[in-house]
Amino acid sequence: MSNTIHVTINGIALEVEKGKTILDAANQAGMIIPTLCFHKDLCIAGNCRVCVVEVSGQKRLAAACATPCEEEMEIQTNSLKVRNSRKHIIELLLSEHNADCTKCYKNGNCELQELASEYKIMTQDFLRLAPMKNYTIDQFSPSIIKDDSKCIRCQRCVRTCAELQGVNALTVAYKGDEMKIASFFEKAMNDVVCTNCGQCVNHCPTGALVERNYIEEVWDAISDPDKHVVVQTAPAVRVGLGEEMGMEVGSRVTGKMVSALKRLGFNAVLDTDFTADLTIIEEGTELLNRLKKALKEKDNSVKLPMATSCSPGWIKYIEHMYPEFLEHLSTCKSPQQMFGALVKTYYAKARKIDPENIVSVSIMPCTAKKFEANRPEMHDSGYRDVDYVLTTRELAIMIKQAGIDFKKLPDEKFDRLMGESTGAGVIFGATGGVMEAALRTAYELVTGREVPFENLNITPVRGMEGVRQATIKIENPLTQWDFLDGVELKCAVAHGLVNAQKVMDEVKSGTSQYHFIEVMACPGGCLGGGGQPIPTSPEIREKRMEAIYAEDAGMPLRKSHENPEILKIYQDFLGEPLGLKSHHLLHTKYIGRDRL
Amino acid sequence: MVAHSYQLKRADFIFKNENDWERILDKMLKRPTRELINELMSSELKGRGGAGFPTGLKWKLTAEDPSDTKFVICNADEGEPGTFKDREILTKVPYKVLMAMAVCGYVIGSNQGYIYLRGEYKFLVPELNKVIQEFEYYCKQIGHDFSIKIFLGSGAYICGEETALFESMEGKRGEPRNKPPYPSSNGYMGKATVVNNVETLAHTFTIFKYGAKKFYDLGVQYSRGSKLFSVSGDTPKPGIYELELGMSLQDFVNEFGDGDTKAVQVGGASGFLVPRKRFEKTTIGYRGKLTGISLPTGGSMMLFNSSRSMYNVLDNYLEFFREESCGQCTPCRVGCQQLHFGIKAVKRGDKPAQYLDKLLKLTETMQLTAKCGLGQSVANSFSSIVENFREEMIY
Ligand SMILES: Cc1cc2nc3c(=O)[nH]c(=O)nc-3n(C[C@H](O)[C@H](O)[C@H](O)COP(=O)(O)O)c2cc1C
Ligand code: SF4
């Protein structure tokens, strides 16, 4: 049987693979069919109906995204019938929509707005339904704002939360004209299982789900002459920001980003990668301690596998879904929060600045980090450790507001003290990166030799497979670690919370053999984070990932324990890994939560 | 000139008590499945649940699916306003439906049947379960592996749409799916499934017992057999009547009207309104070709006399659709609101009379683009009422 099908699109003959939809075929033919509910990351919904096309011999129009091609199909994507219907549908969506675009956070990056503009919908013949509705705005979460008046009911968020994250914090409620997207019993998103990962924000075509922004607060701090405003930037920001500035996907803009931050007026531009390196030292030591207790001292109370704790979306997820496994989490804070705690202690002391006057800002690819910074326990410096968290998108807005021509910026370097990092810190931005960085250090610590992978690239833990496993056999360790001789260290890496669920269910059922698992809440890891530029897609994440590994490969130092500033901070301030000071500033506790 | 050669004919198959269903079942289970399919095909029985799909073909397609697990579902969601016939069937002759399901299971290769029962019919459950028990007991005795479970709906009209019904049974929100794929290959739990209306199944009993010809001889071309009609509204004799298909609406009104019938809504809210001047020319059956109009969706016939405001009737239907749309697709969810609030705005004088034309255009779009039969059929009542009673909409 042949595997191809013959169709014509607007008269052009085409051969397409069996099983492809009309939308796929049109793309193949270079025809663009507008879509709203369609998203490459998600299953097909076919509910917005803007992608309707005419198929010869069929009475009704077909939704291109949901209709498979059939042999001899003759498809019209721009007939009068199609145009009129599409226009009607856009008009209908607008009539239900709070179309006060100039007051919308997503103005300029909204798929509905774009369509309205494309089809030049300039009159409002239908009744305005939006004012007749009791739309609510949920602003209780420190991470996400949900504004129902902007919602077009495409259910992309619902599918995202279910299919990518397995969380189901957002579902469809009611029917008919009252149908809406709601959390459990219409509680505030802050009061339900929502992990604040922001994937819904990243997949929302309009302004219905956006990050809670702190742009004005940060401008105020910068403008306050009494404040010393310190900014840290997460690894994934440098491979995403360029997209917001009109550059190609996958552009590496570290130097330009630093330059822009300096021009925005931050007093010190530092690097979260530094505390990523620090995390490796602390977490690596913690893992080795657990292994020692379990394997040498035969202590049954030791919790293995140990799980990474850098992703605050993952943390909130496990707190809700697997509260009985909290002790499996590394007690390490995320790099952002380690950084925050150190800025108002170590950094303040070294720079002789009153921590009271320090405002600590972080630029993150993440919306969950906003929630994390807001957690009551994150005050170990004696102050709120991180004052404001901005997403990559918010930073882009500030750069544009400041009138900075980003592409023309020179490359600049991070300021010192907590600005030095290694390639190991950079790869925290990709799924598998923490695992790879940890292995680079732990293996060397234990054996005195580099990890046995070409150019230090631990390829088995890299890639986009939802769950990846790797085994590293330890041979000829240093005497201190002789109990590890011949041990096969078993690791698993998961990204996207549906995949985390798979690994956790293995752990729960007792069938897991793992020693160490890395979980990142977002698909692709932080580079696909909820605070990264919109749109997102598997291809986009792939390019950002290539950029991350290129960044790593280009670094002079690629192992966390070789970072001179790390050596210095232990010498001058922390003493030793898992020491008293570390314990106080760099480690934390977790809280079991309801499953609402 | 032949005025109307056809007269209103009563039929009495559905509710006729047959005390030999065991014997018929035995007989059917011995016949080759191909033969049973042919029997159904030659009867030209079409689905009585709304879409009018040929029942024999539906069984055939499902029988041909290679799946190892298949299901038979009896659609007893009966949500169309003005229909109440399925309830009667399940009360009076439930064994006919059960037997038909078992035969269907035999034909398509399924040993599991479900009755998707409208939530409001919960009171039927104890009695129905008793009959099912007896029925399953008999099946066991004769060595036929088939069981039937009742699944209770929870009151949403849309769950009567077959794919929304699957979703609902799977524990999900009752939202229609994209088609294709069709139930004959991807139904309940993604398996090949036959969904038939209660009445459709009851008719197959007649066909299996008396042969296809008996059924075929009733009715007219394209519209064979008899059908239950739920008669309501301004009529001296409301109730359920089994009538041969192919009658003219005039004959129907002569029989059931109160002498002052101004219009008849054929097929419930998703059907058409026929004004008096078109009674003669309207034939009740499955195809528009016979000067008539299309299918009598669940078989609801609602008569209106001159005291009725057609505006109120439409207002009522549109409110129903506005609320009963599942809300997932744009043309239906927003379209229904625009239509409903639109006629109110015209009535109030907030919009000019010409706005009705804009709304008529909108119903065309809904018909062309809505995801399921609900949104697609709102145009039927809207355009037939607005076009025939435009003044009543405005003044
Ligand atoms: C909105 C909507 C509601 C429906 N409700 C019912 C119903 O209550 N009962 C029913 O038998 N079919 C209903 N149908 C039709 C079913 O989708 C399906 O076509 C039918 O059950 C098939 O059975 P049949 O071939 O025996 O008619 C409905 C369809 C739509 C679009
Ligand atoms: S047409 Fe109406 S009922 Fe059908 S899928 Fe669309 S919104 Fe739901």
Image: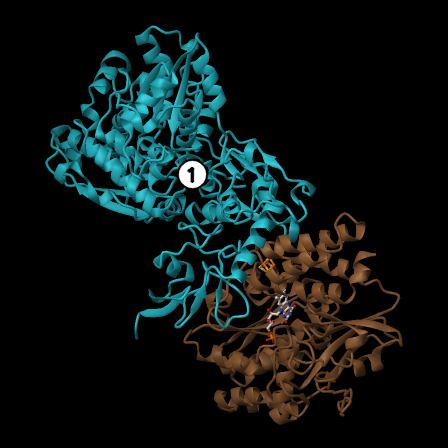
Chain colours: A cyan, B brown
Residue B214 screen position, x and y as percent = 65, 93
Residue sitting nearer the eye, A35 or B51? A35
Amino acid at dot 1: Ile
Is residue A17 left or right of A449 when viewed as pictured? right
Residue A281 screen position, x and y as percent = 25, 26
Residue A365 occupies quadrant? top left
Ligand 2 positioned in quadrant: bottom right
Q: Is residue B159 visible?
A: no
Residue density around tag 1, few if under 14, some if 14–19, many if 20 or more, within 10 Å: many
Vertical side of A449 occupied by A523: above or below:
below
At a point 68% along the width and 47% down the height, the residue shown is A127
Residue sitting nearer the eye, B394 or A308? B394
Residue A430 screen position, x and y as percent = 30, 38
Vertical side of A555 occupied by A56: above or below:
below
Q: Chain of mark 1?
A: A
Q: Quadrant of the N terminus of chain B?
A: bottom right
Residue for badge 1: A318
Residue B122 screen position, x and y as percent = 70, 64
